[in-house]
Image: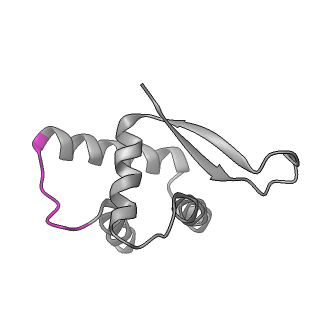
Amino acid sequence: MPSQLRAADSSPAVPTSKCMTIELKPETKELLDAELQTGRFRSIDDLIVEGVHALHRNDARSFTAEERRAAVRRMMEFAEKNRTPLDGVSVKELLHEGHRI
């Protein structure tokens, strides 16, 4: 059963609503919760905004967004399948390092 996430919505297209409900797969919610626990973000809203900004920054890369998403999916599947420990390093940090290569 997907989890629900409520986030502030300041979009002028939805003037009567202050919040948005988003359904998440359990593994997505776990990923967001784990990232929040690192203390880097104060809220889900901050995390989502940073994620969107990161996507925009990466648009100029040679890989398409779908290729990047596929690579992340493959990395996550590999880590899950092989129970690869990350030793306190977040997936976000690993991805950032991968972009420097």
User: How far from the left and from the top, in percent, is residue 12?
Assistant: 87, 53
The chief SS type of the magenta part is loop
User: How far from the left and from the top, in percent, is residue 47?
Assistant: 51, 62
29 in magenta = no
Q: Relative to 72, does residue 58 appear above or below in the rendering?
A: below
Q: Relative to 87, does residue 7 appear above or below in the rendering?
A: above
**Viewer-proximal residue, 47 or 16?**
16
Q: Which residue is drawn at 19% across and 67% down?
A: 88
Left or right of 75: which side holds 4?
right
87 in magenta = yes
User: How far from the left and from the top, in percent, is residue 62?
Assistant: 52, 60
View extreme (top): residue: 1
Q: Which residue is drawn at 62% across and 51% down?
A: 7
Q: Which residue is drawn at 60% across and 63% down?
A: 49
Q: In which quarter of the image is the C terminus?
A: bottom left
Quadrant of res 91: bottom left
Quadrant of res 27: top left
Q: Relative to 85, does residue 71 appear above or below in the rendering?
A: above
The count of marks equals: 0
Q: Residue at x 42, y 25 (%)?
A: 1
User: How far from the left and from the top, in percent, is residue 84?
Assistant: 12, 51
- How did the renderer colour the structure? one colour
Q: Relative to 100, does residue 44 appear above or below in the rendering?
A: above
User: In the image, which residues are magenta?
Assistant: 82-89
